């Protein structure tokens, strides 16, 4: 079944006893899109992800994965997705290869694909050793390999960077980007490492106290600049003529902040200002970073 | 399922348990050796009764009770038995022993109960002509007990049938304390297996689900599009197979070793069972409690006794089957109990997330289940508790107040019910 979205979550609600953990959660993930999922501990990230994986049953709501309703066509919906929720679940007393083979047998996957996945994990020699001796990074790569055994179109990762050293994080990031490009996959992942989310995600969804927080799309092409000029009124008039009044604001007696879609508009603004003999003392980018947004949303320091 | 089973078999727990079973088997063999040292008779076969008969030949005591021809015939057969035993002619030994038992059965035939008397007569006559060397049934007299019924005739009929079967199949007697693979297996199945059948599900299946949930394996597997009921059932089947593997694989190995060291018994060796147990739901009640020696052994078979007006005698209705048939039935009831016990342990493991608590709860449930139901195995009760159906040999020989058919139904229904509850619960469980 073809669908515009890899994942559609509509009005998801979940309560544990009297405690409401998800409140009308709705969002979507497009095909070939990497979406980060951010929120403090207890915000409802893992519960949302578990609902999507059918590990937790929501009280109400709809989850559609690659066009299949999770609650009506569970097996078809889950067939095209893979997930790593919380710590990777692996049989510690088995070798890495045996772990892969076990899940492959469950899903009826052939030897050729098993070998591809063994290569993918990069654990070629270590695969014949017991998982109990693996580092966190090795376990993560093995679990990821197992997750993509059936070539899913949608991958859910719950804090995949947890416990990884910097080289492990870089390796995982590159791997995930490769999966999106080469395997035509969409990825929905949560993380507390905001910098990594910013580097990896095309789009970010924020959640707090079980509710999705609406924030400007910081990952879009819109760029913000602050310009310091000699004549504020004339400058405001000039810039407003080009980008419209809604896209600018005066932030000091000589400074204006404005938003533009591309670099060509910036050249035009500078050209017009200089043509009207307005002096430009300074101009710099004022793009909002994820940490600032996080601090604004949750009214506290970003958790890193 | 097979992968899970393979993983379990490879685990260190398996080998610890295999060693434990080997140790128990060693202790069992040691017990048999001690029993053999304390054996009440000398020589290969038990000819104590025949020797006593000969010693008392001409005694007024016997002459008073039965006619002279019966006494003479009995002594004559007793002498032939002793001679056959001396010559190690086990075929003749069994033939004469069968006849000797039939003479006693006829002597003890009830005077007061016409139905029992008729039943005994029919049973005796079934094999009389085959072993009597032309001695007429009518010429053997009966022993007079007044109006009392002691069922001693049936005890002797059992003995006669047993020896006649051996004679027919050209087999020698194996007693319960003779060490060979058959006697060891029987003793193991009746003494050790019931304990292991209660212990293994608790030890090995109490964490079958929650261990996977806690370690994340359940999340990994269930997010692969595998239906929860399939996962639950595959864990269940692998759990049952694992327990059966641990119960029987070491046993095959040990039996082979015993066979090579002490000799192999024939798989056709006669074993007693209660055939009516497979046809009806009303049990024959088990009155062994309070008896000084609650069981009678014929060959390797353990038969429950009862006390009738102060006399200890045997329960009625037993027949003989070859050992291999008996073994198949034991395996069947072992499987049935494992199906029930693993379903219960797995349900506990699905409900309780902590492995420690689920172990404690499973232990408590199985112990309480057994202890509370135990009194119903004896006396005039109808035993409906699946917890007490952990002794396949007792079920087959009809000595646990539940027939084999009733046990079959109870164990199957309990397993299906527990499995259904488990699947329904697990399908809705948040993981």
Image (cartoon, rainbow, N blue to C red):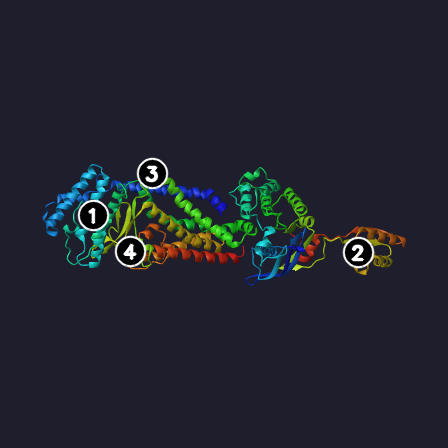
Between marks 3 and 1, how big is the CA–CA gap?
36 Å
Say which label, 3 or 1, has the lower sequence index: 1
Between marks 2 and 1, how big is the CA–CA gap?
119 Å
Task: Assess whether mark 1 and mark 3 are in contact (beta carbons under 8 angstroms).
Answer: no
- Residue corresponding to mark 4: B286
Judge by depth and name the residue closer to the eye, B305 or B28. B305
Which type of secondary structure does the marked residue at label 4 adopt? Answer: loop
Mark 3 falls within which chain?
A: B
- Please determine if labels 4 and 2 lie on a single subunit: no
Task: Assess whether mark 3 and mark 4 are in contact (beta carbons under 8 angstroms).
Answer: no
Task: Assess whether mark 2 and mark 4 are in contact (beta carbons under 8 angstroms).
Answer: no
Which type of secondary structure does the marked residue at label 1 adopt? Answer: helix
Say which label, 4 or 3, has the lower sequence index: 3
Camera-side mark, 2 or 1:
1
Mark 2 falls within which chain?
A: A
Between marks 1 and 4, how big is the CA–CA gap?
34 Å
Camera-side mark, 4 or 3:
3
- Residue corresponding to mark 2: A258
Q: Is residue B151 left or right of residue A283?
A: left
Q: Is residue A221 visible?
A: yes
- Residue corresponding to mark 3: B259
Judge by depth and name the residue closer to the eye, B83 or B131. B131
Q: Is residue B387 left or right of residue A212?
A: left
Q: Position of residue B175 (x, y in %)?
A: 27, 43
> Which residue appears farthest toward the bottom when viewing the image?
A18
- Residue corresponding to mark 1: B129
Between marks 4 and 3, how big is the CA–CA gap?
34 Å
Which type of secondary structure does the marked residue at label 2 adopt? Answer: strand
- Please determine if labels 1 and 4 lie on a single subunit: yes
Between marks 2 and 3, how big is the CA–CA gap?
94 Å
Task: Assess whether mark 1 and mark 2 are in contact (beta carbons under 8 angstroms).
Answer: no
């Amino acid at each position: 079944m073809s669908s515009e979205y890899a994942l559609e979550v509509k009005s998801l609600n979940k309560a544990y006893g009297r405690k409401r953990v998800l409140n009308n959660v709705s969002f979507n993930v497009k095909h070939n899109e990497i979406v980060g999922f951010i929120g403090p501990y207890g915000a409802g990230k893992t519960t949302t992800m578990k609902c999507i994986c059918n590990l937790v049953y929501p009280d109400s709501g709809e989850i559609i994965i690659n066009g299949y309703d999770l609650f009506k066509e569970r097996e078809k919906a889950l067939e095209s997705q893979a997930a790593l929720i919380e710590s990777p679940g692996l049989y510690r007393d088995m070798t890495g290869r045996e772990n892969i083979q076990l899940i492959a047998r469950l899903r009826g996957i052939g030897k050729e694909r098993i070998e591809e996945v063994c290569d993918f994990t990069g654990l070629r020699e270590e695969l014949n050793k017991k998982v109990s001796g693996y580092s966190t990074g090795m376990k993560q790569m093995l679990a990821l390999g197992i997750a993509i055994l059936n070539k899913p179109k949608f991958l859910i990762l719950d804090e995949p960077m947890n416990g990884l050293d910097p080289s492990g994080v870089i390796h995982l990031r590159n791997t995930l980007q490769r999966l999106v490009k080469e395997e035509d996959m969409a990825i929905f992942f949560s993380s507390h490492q905001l910098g990594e989310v910013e580097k990896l995600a095309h789009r970010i969804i924020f959640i707090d106290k079980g509710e999705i927080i609406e924030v400007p799309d910081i990952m879009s092409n819109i760029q913000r600049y602050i310009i310091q000029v000699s004549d504020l009124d004339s400058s405001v008039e000039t810039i407003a003529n080009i980008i419209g009044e809604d896209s600018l604001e005066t932030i000091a007696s000589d400074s204006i902040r404005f938003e533009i879609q591309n670099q060509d508009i910036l050249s035009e603004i500078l050209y017009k200002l200089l043509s009207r003999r307005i002096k430009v003392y300074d101009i710099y980018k004022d793009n909002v970073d994820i940490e600032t947004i996080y601090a604004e949303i949750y009214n506290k320091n970003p958790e890193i | 399922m097979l992968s899970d089973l393979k993983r379990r078999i490879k685990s260190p727990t398996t080998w610890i348990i295999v060693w434990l079973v080997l140790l128990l088997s060693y202790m069992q063999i040691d017990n048999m050796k001690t029993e053999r040292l304390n054996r009440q008779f000398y020589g290969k076969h038990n000819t104590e009764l025949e020797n006593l008969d000969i010693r008392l030949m001409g005694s007024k005591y016997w002459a008073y009770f039965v006619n002279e021809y019966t006494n003479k015939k009995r002594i004559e057969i007793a002498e032939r038995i002793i001679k056959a035993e001396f010559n190690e002619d086990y075929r003749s030994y069994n033939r004469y022993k069968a006849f000797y038992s039939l003479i006693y059965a006829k002597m003890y035939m009830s005077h007061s109960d016409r139905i029992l008397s008729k039943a005994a007569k029919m049973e005796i006559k079934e094999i009389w002509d085959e072993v009597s060397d032309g001695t007429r049934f009518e010429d053997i007299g009966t022993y007079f007990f007044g109006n009392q019924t002691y069922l001693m005739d049936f005890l002797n009929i059992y003995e006669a049938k047993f020896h006649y079967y051996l004679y027919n199949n050209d087999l020698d007697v194996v007693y319960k304390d003779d060490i060979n693979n058959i006697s060891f297996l029987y003793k193991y199945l009746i003494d050790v297996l019931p304990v292991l059948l209660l212990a293994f599900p608790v030890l090995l299946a109490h964490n079958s689900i929650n261990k996977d949930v806690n370690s994340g394996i359940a999340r990994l597997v269930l997010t692969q599009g595998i239906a929860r009921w399939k996962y639950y059932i595959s864990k269940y089947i692998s759990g049952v197979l694992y327990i059966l593997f641990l119960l029987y694989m070491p046993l095959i190995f040990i039996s082979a070793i015993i066979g090579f060291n002490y000799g192999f018994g024939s798989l056709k060796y006669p074993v007693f069972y209660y055939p009516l147990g497979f046809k009806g739901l009303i049990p024959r009640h088990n009155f062994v409690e309070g008896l000084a020696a609650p069981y009678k052994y014929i060959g390797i078979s353990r038969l429950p006794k009862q006390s009738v007006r102060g006399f200890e005698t045997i329960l009625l209705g037993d027949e003989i089957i070859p050992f291999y048939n008996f073994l198949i039935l034991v395996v069947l009831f072992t499987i049935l109990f494992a199906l029930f016990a693993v379903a219960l342990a797995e349900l506990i493991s699905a409900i309780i997330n902590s492995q420690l608590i689920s172990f404690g709860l499973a232990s408590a449930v199985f112990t309480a289940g057994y202890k509370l139901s135990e009194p119903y195995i004896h006396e005039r009760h109808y035993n409906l508790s699946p917890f007490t159906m952990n002794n396949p040999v007792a079920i087959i020989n009809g000595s646990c107040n539940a027939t084999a058919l009733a046990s079959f139904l109870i164990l199957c229904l309990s397993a299906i019910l527990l499995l259904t509850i488990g699947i329904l619960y697990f399908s809705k469980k948040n993981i």
